């Protein structure tokens, strides 16, 4: 995106900027000449205008939205081990609070960053449209809570307060702790199986493309308002091939063994419940090695129709998967291709 | 008004009181009729109808059967009034408590239309016994009648053999129980739908027949079937079935052949009475055709189309004079040089002998009842016998039906039933199949069978018997009336690699044009000698005036042609021309080490090597060239509907090099090519273009293009949608030099977000990657946003299907990416599935479904 003229420069609150994607969004906004204020619990080095606080605290939120004219809301609970109440309080209640404060502060535009999993019900998706979020049918606490929040957010869309939902799908890039570094750690330890030989075709999103699409969602909010748009690289790949590419880029051995997807899904359910119970008793603090949600993500096709996204945002991804893997290799010292 | 039923808005439902003039009623009686009628809706929409469809259901359905007509007309705002009646005692019309017979029912319908005060032209639409009743109405209202539409019905009283299902239903012991006391007859009828009816639709059909009292009409209908000559309704049936012979209005017959009651034999009978009819047989559909398939679109398309005449004006003959197919035979009655030679068993006939044998055979067939227009199915392997039979049929003006064993037994049976031959001539194996599978046609054996066996197989005569009977009169060419040039001559079948095999009809003029195209394109002179290793062209030998020899091979299995067999055949007649298929040539090359010096010399005499049936891979062509060093190696591109479209020789293949597709050369003599350009959705724009480099559906125009598809009116309309051109269903483009490049099948075009992608170029690029075998490019995902997937064989072959190894995947993706095609995934398989007949065409549609499932996650099955 080229720098905007001063007249078009906006004051944008970015929540969840301590995460990889939120940080990239804030950085992109600033590089385009916008004023980006970040809102998170802990200070983030070199972030400029920064409000520290919690989505659970209305006073913190009020300070954060003060004198802003747009919000990009990325903050969310993504853990697998915490009970539903924690998801509900951060992802649903937190979003409602932020929406209320934003409207109260006469903020014009609100981009809710969501997930395609809000409309993914466990069946393979091939070239699927975004679909409508469904908290009843979405899989897992994270997706259910995001689904409820997205429905609420889009329900707030009005002539005076424009709301759009952007759903980036499996975002990855250098420094990504959610997917890339987990894959690398487990592969290095020889504990990373492929599910069903890794043939499921999935869409992913390179970090720069995800950030650009979210910022574009704000720029094109007149066209995007009231809609939920799935964003991907538009290059579906077999999951096994992607994981192998990430492993090569990270300089670790590729997974050599495959387990059946049905087994992983079953095991994932058991492990998930055991971890949750252990977590409640303070026995474990990290994420479980396999969850049902993750097993489903890695063993069923989910790739999307990007035509509407490209049309509404008037945008296409600029970094291909191959280029992304090259950047990953440059970061981790592995090889690409 | 009746309530709301699935797919039928209540607004069309209405009741009206109609006074009856039927004989069964006491004068002055009147009944409450239920009809579906869109008259009010048309009026509200300000649409002036151009005509009325009068739809008559059969037993045991009701007007609900026709709901798709209402939906289609309403959706497209068509100017047609539709009236679908519930007959008295049926559906939601009144129960009269009387036994209404056929004559009453025809009269009832007239009473109703009088009460409705129908004006303007009427098209009757009937199903099952409603078909006869609608025709009865048609005969009584010819001043108003515009056309007739019939679906799965029968009017034929003579030799009426009641199907087992109905025999049982009408048997006195079970009749009342089966049709009235219980709903068994209804349930059986509803179970005939393919696929099965949805539960709510089944319930809708059942709704008006909930009690035994409501079902009295169902039972009476069955009891009124006049299968016995003395049946009280027989005279009424006879009046209708003979009366319609005089109906000259356009007719459309839509048929579900999987009907245990109104089978193909009734369709054939109707065609005899309504020869002007257009027909579409929906392969795989059954009795409840309106439930199984979309009949509304073709009916309205036919009603508004120019149809209404049987044949379009005869097409241009390309400036060539019409010479009958038998002209060469007739000119050479004194020529004692060999005309046809069989290698095994060894046999040959001179021109004089062949001509006499053809005449004898024709006379014999004539004695048996074969007439001009009779369809004669020939289940006979290539050779002298088949050649004799073909030219005898052409002499008589009978239509040869040539379905080969390459279709497989099931495909062959479907093809023969669809064609409905009056006569079937076959070798013993074919006759066993005909008997076991109940193929139609009076059966004639190639060899005289022992009487007991002949009786078992219902064989009426044999080729030797026919020849002997015919020869008695010493027939000559002049004893036969020449066949009309534009009458049907031959019925061939497509390979069925893209669905059920389709029948393709050629007239005498078109067959002759095919012969002339072959002669002009390849300079085939009368007096040349050819080896007939590829059936369709080989059959033209006697018409070309060329000596033809059939090599020792199983022509239905091209892989059985050995190098020695080919050479022996060539040597037998000093052949200069060889017709073969790529599969046959591959086997010839594989067995070339067995050739003796003499056999090699025979092949060195060959001047024209024609490889037909599928494109010849350049490497194979090179090797063939080495085997026949003095031959010009040619390969034509064509299809059953136009056996020759373009031609290219080996030098041309080399000169063309690689490009987007396979270069198949320039049009054969008399043919023109153009392109129906694909739009962004991958749909052809229906106008011919010759702009170079633009991809679209390949169109061909030539005097030897098929006349029409047989009994596939919808398919024919589609293929002839661009006037003067045949839509081939292949996609490709023309280059600056006017050469045609074939890029694949229209049905296999990928519809991606970036626009349509044709498969062949990507496949060629993938195949060129080291370690690759054959490759197919297939789509996964919904049209408009499909992803491209390469499915390929490897060398050595993969042990089981799955994702390609990372390195191969990367190489294929990069190779195909060079053409701007982004590959989502590369899958390897031990072997790609191919069609039965040529063993070469890859079944991409099947592969696409498999790839979609493999890439959805879960266990990967075999393709």
Image: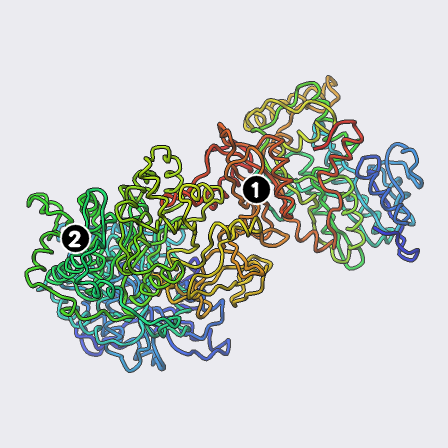
Up the image or down, B30 lies above or below B340; here it is below
Q: Residue at x 49, y 56 (%)?
A: B665
| Chain under callout 2 | B
Q: Badge 1 is on which residue?
A: B789
Quadrant in the rendering for residue B279:
bottom left
The answer to whether any part of residue B176 appears in the image is no
Q: Badge 2 is on which residue?
A: B167
The answer to whether any part of residue A183 appears in the image is yes
Judge by depth and name the residue closer to the eye, B863 or B284: B863
Provide residue B451's location: percent of width, then percent of height. 6, 45
Crowding at mark 1 (Cα within 10 Å: few <14, some 14-19, many 20+): many
Query: What's the CA distance linking mark 2 and mark 1?
Result: 54 Å
Which secondary structure lies at badge 1? strand
Provide residue B475's location: percent of width, then percent of height. 11, 64
* In the displayed structure image, the side of residue A273 where residue B76 appears, left or right: left
Q: Residue at x 44, y 41 (%)?
A: B626
* In the displayed structure image, the side of residue A206 where residue B539 appears, left or right: left
Provide residue A146's location: percent of width, then percent of height. 71, 40
* In the displayed structure image, the side of residue A173 where residue A201 appears, left or right: left
Which secondary structure lies at badge 2? helix
Labels 2, 1: one chain: yes
Q: Residue furthest top?
A: A283
């Amino acid at each position: 995106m080229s720098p905007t003229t001063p007249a078009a420069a906006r004051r944008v609150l970015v929540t969840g900027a301590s995460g990889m994607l939120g940080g990239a969004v804030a950085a992109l906004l600033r590089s385009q000449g916008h004023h980006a204020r970040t809102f998170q619990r802990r200070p983030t080095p070199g972030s400029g205008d920064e409000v520290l606080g919690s989505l659970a605290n209305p006073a913190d939120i009020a300070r954060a939205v003060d004198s802003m004219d747009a919000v990009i809301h990325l903050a969310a609970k993504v853990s697998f081990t915490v009970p539903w109440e924690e998801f509900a309080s951060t992802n649903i209640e937190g979003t409602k609070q932020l929406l209320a404060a934003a409207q109260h502060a006469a903020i014009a535009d609100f981009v809710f960053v969501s997930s395609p999993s809000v409309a993914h019900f466990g069946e393979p998706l091939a070239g699927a449209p975004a679909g409508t979020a469904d908290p009843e049918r979405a899989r897992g606490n994270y997706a259910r809570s995001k689904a409820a929040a997205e429905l609420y957010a889009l329900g707030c869309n009005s002539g005076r307060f424009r709301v759009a939902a952007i759903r980036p799908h499996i975002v990855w890039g250098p420094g990504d702790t959610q997917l890339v570094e987990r894959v690398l750690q487990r592969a290095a330890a020889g504990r990373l199986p492929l599910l069903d030989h890794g043939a499921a075709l999935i869409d992913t999103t390179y970090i720069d493309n995800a950030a650009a699409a979210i910022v574009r969602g704000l720029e094109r909010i007149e066209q995007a308002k009231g809609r939920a748009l799935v964003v991907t690289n538009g290059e579906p790949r077999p999951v096994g091939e992607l994981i192998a590419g990430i492993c090569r880029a990270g300089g670790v051995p590729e997974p050599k063994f495959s387990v059946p997807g049905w087994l992983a899904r079953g095991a994932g359910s058991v492990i998930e419940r055991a971890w949750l119970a252990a977590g409640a008793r303070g026995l474990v603090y990290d994420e479980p090695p396999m969850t049902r949600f993750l097993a489903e993500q890695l063993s069923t096709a989910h790739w999307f129709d990007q035509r509407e996204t490209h049309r509404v945002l008037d945008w296409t991804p600029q970094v291909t998967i191959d280029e992304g893997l090259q950047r990953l290799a440059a970061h981790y010292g592995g090889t690409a291709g | 008004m009746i309530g709301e039923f699935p797919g039928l808005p209540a607004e069309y439902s209405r009741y009206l009181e109609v006074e009856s003039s039927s004989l069964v009623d006491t004068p002055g009686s009147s009944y409450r009729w239920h009809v579906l009628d869109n008259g009010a809706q048309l009026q509200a929409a300000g649409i002036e109808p151009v005509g009325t469809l009068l739809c008559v259901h059969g037993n045991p359905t009701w007007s609900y059967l026709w709901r798709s007509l209402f939906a289609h007309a309403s959706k497209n705002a068509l100017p047609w009034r539709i009236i679908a009646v519930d007959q008295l005692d049926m559906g939601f019309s009144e129960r009269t408590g009387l036994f209404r017979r056929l004559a009453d029912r025809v009269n009832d319908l007239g009473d109703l239309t009088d009460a409705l005060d129908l004006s303007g032209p009427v098209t009757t639409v009937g199903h099952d016994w409603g078909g006869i009743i609608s025709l009865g109405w048609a005969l009584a209202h010819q001043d108003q009648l515009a056309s007739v539409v019939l679906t799965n019905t029968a009017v034929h009283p003579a030799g009426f053999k009641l199907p087992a299902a109905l025999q049982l239903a009408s048997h006195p012991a079970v009749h009342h129980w089966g049709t009235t006391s219980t709903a068994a007859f209804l349930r059986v009828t509803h179970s005939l739908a393919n696929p099965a009816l949805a539960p709510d639709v089944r319930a809708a059909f059942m709704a008006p027949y909930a009690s035994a009292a409501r079902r009295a009409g169902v039972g009476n209908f069955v009891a009124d079937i006049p299968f016995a000559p003395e049946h009280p309704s027989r005279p009424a049936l006879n009046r209708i079935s003979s009366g319609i012979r005089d109906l000259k209005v356009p007719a459309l017959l839509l048929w579900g052949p999987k009907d245990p009651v109104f089978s193909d034999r009734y369709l054939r009978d109707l065609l005899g009475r309504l020869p002007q009819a257009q027909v579409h047989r929906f392969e795989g559909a059954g009795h409840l055709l309106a439930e199984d398939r979309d009949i509304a679109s073709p009916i309205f398309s036919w009603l508004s189309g120019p149809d209404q005449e049987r044949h379009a004006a005869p097409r241009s003959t390309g400036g060539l004079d019409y010479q009958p197919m038998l002209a060469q035979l007739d000119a050479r009655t004194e020529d004692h040089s060999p005309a046809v030679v069989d290698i095994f068993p060894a046999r040959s006939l001179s021109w004089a002998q062949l001509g006499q044998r053809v005449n004898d055979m024709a006379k014999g067939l004539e004695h048996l009842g074969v007439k001009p227009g009779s369809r004669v199915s020939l289940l006979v392997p290539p050779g002298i016998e088949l050649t004799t039979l073909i030219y005898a049929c052409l002499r008589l003006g009978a239509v040869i039906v040539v379905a080969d064993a390459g279709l497989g037994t099931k495909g062959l049976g479907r093809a023969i039933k669809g064609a409905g031959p009056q006569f079937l001539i076959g070798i013993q194996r074919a006759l066993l199949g005909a008997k076991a599978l109940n193929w139609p046609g009076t059966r004639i054996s190639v060899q005289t069978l022992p009487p007991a066996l002949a009786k078992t197989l219902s064989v009426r005569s044999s080729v030797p018997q026919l020849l002997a009977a015919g020869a008695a009169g010493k027939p000559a060419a002049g004893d036969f009336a020449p066949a009309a040039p534009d009458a049907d001559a031959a019925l061939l079948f497509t390979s069925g690699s893209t669905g059920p095999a389709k029948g393709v009809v050629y007239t005498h003029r078109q067959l002759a044009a095919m012969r002339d195209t072959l002669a002009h394109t390849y300079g085939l002179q009368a007096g040349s000698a050819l080896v007939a290793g590829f059936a369709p062209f080989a059959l033209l030998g006697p018409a070309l005036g060329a000596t033809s020899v059939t090599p020792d091979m199983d022509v239905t299995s091209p892989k059985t042609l050995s190098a020695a067999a080919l050479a022996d055949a060539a040597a037998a007649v000093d052949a200069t021309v060889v017709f073969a298929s790529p599969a046959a040539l591959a086997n010839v090359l594989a067995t070339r080490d067995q050739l003796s010096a003499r056999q090699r010399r025979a092949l060195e005499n060959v001047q024209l090597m024609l490889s037909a049936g599928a494109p010849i891979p350049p490497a194979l062509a090179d090797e063939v060239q080495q085997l026949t060093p003095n031959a010009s190696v040619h390969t034509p591109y064509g299809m059953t509907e136009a056996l020759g479209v373009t031609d290219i020789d080996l030098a041309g293949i080399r000169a063309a090099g690689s490009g987007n597709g396979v270069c198949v050369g320039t049009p054969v003599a008399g043919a023109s090519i153009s392109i129906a350009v694909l739009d962004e959705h991958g749909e052809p724009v229906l106008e011919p273009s010759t702009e170079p480099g633009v991809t679209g559906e390949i169109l061909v125009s030539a005097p030897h293009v098929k006349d029409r598809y047989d009994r596939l009116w919808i398919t024919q309309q589609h293929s002839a949608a661009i006037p003067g051109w045949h839509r081939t269903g292949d996609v490709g483009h023309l280059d600056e030099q006017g050469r045609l490049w074939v890029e694949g099948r229209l049905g296999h075009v990928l519809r991606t977000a970036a626009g349509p992608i044709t498969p062949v170029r990507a496949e060629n690029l993938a195949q060129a990657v080291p370690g690759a075998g054959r490759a197919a490019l297939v789509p996964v995902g919904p049209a408009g946003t499909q992803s491209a997937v390469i499915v390929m064989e490897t060398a050595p072959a993969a042990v089981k299907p799955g994702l390609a190894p990372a390195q191969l995947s990367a190489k294929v993706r990069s190779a195909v990416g060079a053409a701007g095609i982004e590959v989502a995934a590369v899958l390897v398989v031990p072997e790609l599935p191919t069609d039965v007949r040529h063993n070469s065409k890859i079944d991409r549609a099947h592969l696409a479904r498999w790839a979609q499932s493999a890439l959805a996650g879960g266990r990967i099955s075999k393709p």
